[in-house]
Amino acid sequence: MGKLVVLKFGEGSFEQGFAVTLQIGEEHERATTEITGKLPSFPEMPLYYSHWQSSYRQIGNRYRLHADQMQVTNVSMIQDCENTSHILRARFNTWLRAEEFRPLREKWLERLSSTEEVRVILQTENSQLQLLPWHLWDLLERYPKAEIALSSPSYDRIHKPRTLNPLVNILAIVGNSHGIDTQADQALLQQCRNADVSFLVEPQRKELTDHLWGKNWDILFFAGHSSSHGNGESGRIYLNKTDSLSIGELKYALKKAIENGLQLAIFNSCDGLGLARELADLQIPQIIVMREPVPDLVAKEFLKYFLQGFAGGESLYQSVRQARERLQGLEDRFPCATWLPIICQNPAQIPPTWDELRSAKTEEPAPNLTLSTRRRFQRTLLSSLAITALVCGVRLLGFVETLEIQAFDLMMRSRPAEGLDPRLLVITIDDDDLAIQRQNNESLIGASISEKSLNKLLVKLNQYQPRAIGLDIYRDFKAKQPDLITRLQQTQNLVGICKGSDGTVNIKGIKPPPEIPTGNLGFSDFIHDRDGVIRRHLLFMNQEATSLCAAPFAFSLQLASLYLRPSGIQPKFTPEGNLQLGKTIFPNLKFRTGGYQNIDANGGQILLNYRSSKQIAEQVKLTQFLSSSAVNPNAIKDKIVLIGVVAKGDSPDTWPTPYGAPLDEQMPGVLVQAHMISQILAAVQDGRPLLRVWSLWIEVVWIWGWSLVGGVLAWRKLSLPWLVLAVSITSGVLYIVCFGLLIWGAWVPFVPSALSLVVTVGLMSIYNNSKTKVRVASGE
C-alpha cells in the first residue's frame, strides 16, 4: 500500500512567507503524522517564474492555444529558456531548504521510504504557488515513485455511488484544431483496451451538453485549443471555429456528469490551470492539465505514454510521472516539456485504476457453442455470397475504381526491370539542343527542330539504314528549304504525326506535315484516364469527318508495322474487329474492363503494358548526334529511330504515367510512344504478354473465393490480435498473387478481393461474438 502526503499552505504571501502543514499517512487511511513549519518570505520568486514563463512562451512551438494565436518558431530562444529554467530551479530549491522549513523536510525523510509509491497533494489557494515547478523539488526527486498534485483547500466528496460500466466510457471532445494535429489523440484513444470511446468533433454547445447529461462517463477528454484568464482563475476551451466556452458555461452539465460517476478529466491542451481551478469547484475527483502552452508533439507524446501506463495497469499518479519524464527526450526541441503535465486532485477521492473504472466481472466459462460443421459451412457460404454481391455491386458502380487503379499503378512500379529494348533508338531534343539551335541562328518557328538541323539529321540517319524513322514533332506548315521538302517526300521509311479532332471537347486537331505521304502518317493522340494518367494505348480509330488529321492508325502502330514488314507481317483485323499482327491478337477494351467501370472504349484500345525499365531504349541528344563524326552503325541499322522533344522549358510535352504523375516526374511524349512501340513489337516477336483481364464472371468467382477465405478465418474464432495477424498475412498473400499474375499479363481484382475478405471477417466475427453473448446470457 502506498503513502499519501499532504502539504497544506495557510495564509501568507511571498512577501510575508507561508505557514505550512505536512501530513503523512497510509493510503486510504487518516494521517498518522502531522507537523507544522514555515517557508520564509521570498518576494523574488514570482519574478523568477515570470522570467522563465516569458522566455518559454516566446519560443512558440505550435502551441494548442486559442486558434487565432500567432504561431512562430524561434530556435534562438531555446537557450534563453533553458538558462531561465536552471535559475528558477536553483532559486526554488534554495527557498525550500530554508531553516524554518527544515523540520518538515526531516520528518518527510524519516517517515517515507524511497521504494514506496507516494501521492503528494499540494493544497493552496495561491495561484502563484500552484504555478511553481514542484516536481523539481530535490526532495521529491529522491522518490522515483512519487508524484505531486495540486488541490484547493476547499473540497467535498460526491456521495452518490457510482454505477460501474462494462467498459471504460470515454467522452472525447475534439475542439477547434486549427494549426494543430488532433488525429493522433483520437487514434490513441481508440487503441485503449476495454474502452468505449465516443467522439465529438468540433461540436456545438447543445450537442456537448446533451452528451454530458446522457451517459455515465468515466473519463472526459479534450484536445484542441484552450487558454486561461484572470491569472489562472478561469479558462476557456474552443469548441469549434466560432464557439468557445468557460467551465462555468458548462456548469450544470458537468455537475450532472460528476454525479453520474465522472472520475477523470484530461485537457490535452494549453494553459489548463484556469480550467482545473473551475472544475475543482465542481468537486471532480481528478484532472490532468498542462500548466503552460503545450507544443503539439509534446501533447501527443504525453497522451501516448500516459495511456500506455494507465490502461496497462499502472496507477494514475505513476502513469502521469512516467509519461511526464519520458517527455525529456523531446527537450532538445521543446525545452521544459517535462514541466507541463500536472494532476489536480480532489483529496476526498481516491484515484481509481483503469480496471476499477469498469465492472470487470469474471465471466463464467461459456458452454460449448460450436455449431455443426454443416451449419457453419452453410452460414459461411451464404454470408460470403451476400458480401460478394455487395462488393461487386459497389465495384460496378465505380466506387472502388480509384483504389483499384492506384493498386494497379503500385504493382506496375514494383515489377522487375526488363532492360532496354534493342529495337529502338531515341534522338532527344532537350533545352540545351534548343538553345544551341538558337545560338546558330536557326529558325525554330512552329517546331522544336530547325529545317537545317532536321535535313541534316535525316541525311545522316539514312546513311545507316534504319528500318523506320518516327518524327514525333508537329509540322502543320510547309517546309521552306527545297532540300528538306524533297527529303520529306522521298524518305519512304519516315513516319510523321498529326492529331485528330474531338468535337465533344472542342479539339480541332493538328494537320500533318504536308510533304509526308498520307500512308506514312499516324495520329499521336493519347487516351488518358480521369486523373490524367496514361494507362491505355489507342491503336486505331475512325477520325471525324471534319478532322484535320485523317490518319486511321496510331503513330506507334505505323512505326511497328514498318519494322515488321520485312518479316511478312501486315496489320489485319479479326471478324470481332480486333487488330492482328502475325499470330498476336490485340483485343479491344470494353467499357467495363478490369478496374475500369465506365470508360470511353471507342476505337481500338488496349492496356498499355509499359516496359519495366528506368530507360525504355538507348537515347542520344540531337546536338551530340549531329556533331559526332563517328557513329556506331549497329546502333541505327534496322532499328526504329524516334525523334522527339524532352525539353522542359519550351512548351514541354510530358504526360502523367503510373511511374509518376507530378509535373517533375512526368514522362516525355516521345518516350511514351517508345513504350507503345515496344509493347507491340515485344508482343509479336518476343511473346511478351499483353495486359488482359478476366471475364466478369471469373472475376466474381475470384472475389467470392477470397470472401470464403475470410469466412473460414472468422469461423476459427481467433482472438482479436491473432485474427488481425491472420487477415494481414492473408491480404499480403493476395497482393503477392495479384502482383505475380500482373507480371504474367493478367490484371485481376485486388482491392475488391481484399475488401470482401476483410468485410466477411469483420461481419462474421461480430455476428459470432453477439451470438455467443446471447447464448451465455440465456444460459444455453
Image (tube, grey):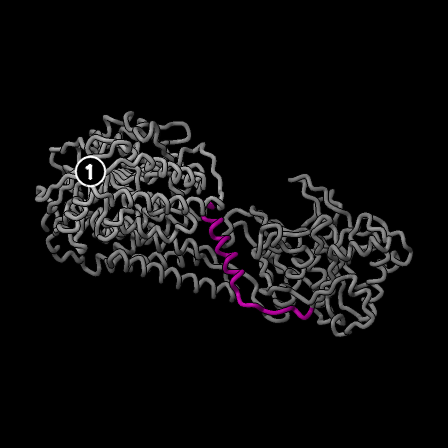
- Asked whether residue 200 appears in the rendered view, the answer is no
Check the image and name the residue furthest to the front: 99
- Asked whether residue 531 appears in the rendered view, the answer is yes
Q: Is residue 195 magenta?
A: no
Residue 32 versus residue 127 in the image, above or below? below
- Taking depth in this image into account, of 323 and 179 the one nearest to the observer is 323
Disc 1 packing (10 Å; few <14; some 14–19; many ≥20)? many
Name the spot of residue 453 as percent of width and height, x first. 83, 59
Q: Residue at x 36, y 58 (%)?
A: 706
- Taking depth in this image into account, of 42 and 530 the one nearest to the observer is 42
Q: Which residue is mark 1?
A: 38
Left or right of 731, for residue 773: left
Name the spot of residue 252 as percent of width and height, x first. 23, 26
Q: Secondary structure at mark 1?
A: strand
- Taking depth in this image into account, of 425 and 226 the one nearest to the observer is 226
Name the spot of residue 593 as percent of width and height, x first. 52, 53
Name the spot of residue 290 as percent of width and height, x first. 32, 40
Q: Residue at x 31, y 61 (%)?
A: 726
Check the image and name the residue furthest to the right: 482
Q: Is residue 413 magenta?
A: yes
Bounds of the magenta span? 397-423
Dividing the picture into quarters, in which one does residue 45 lie? top left
Q: Residue at x 58, y 69 (%)?
A: 418
Dividing the picture into quarters, in which one does residue 230 lie? top left
- Taking depth in this image into account, of 135 and 14 the one nearest to the observer is 14
Left or right of 130, for residue 352: left
Left or right of 725, for residue 477: right
Say what amino acid the circle numbered 1 marks.
Answer: Lys
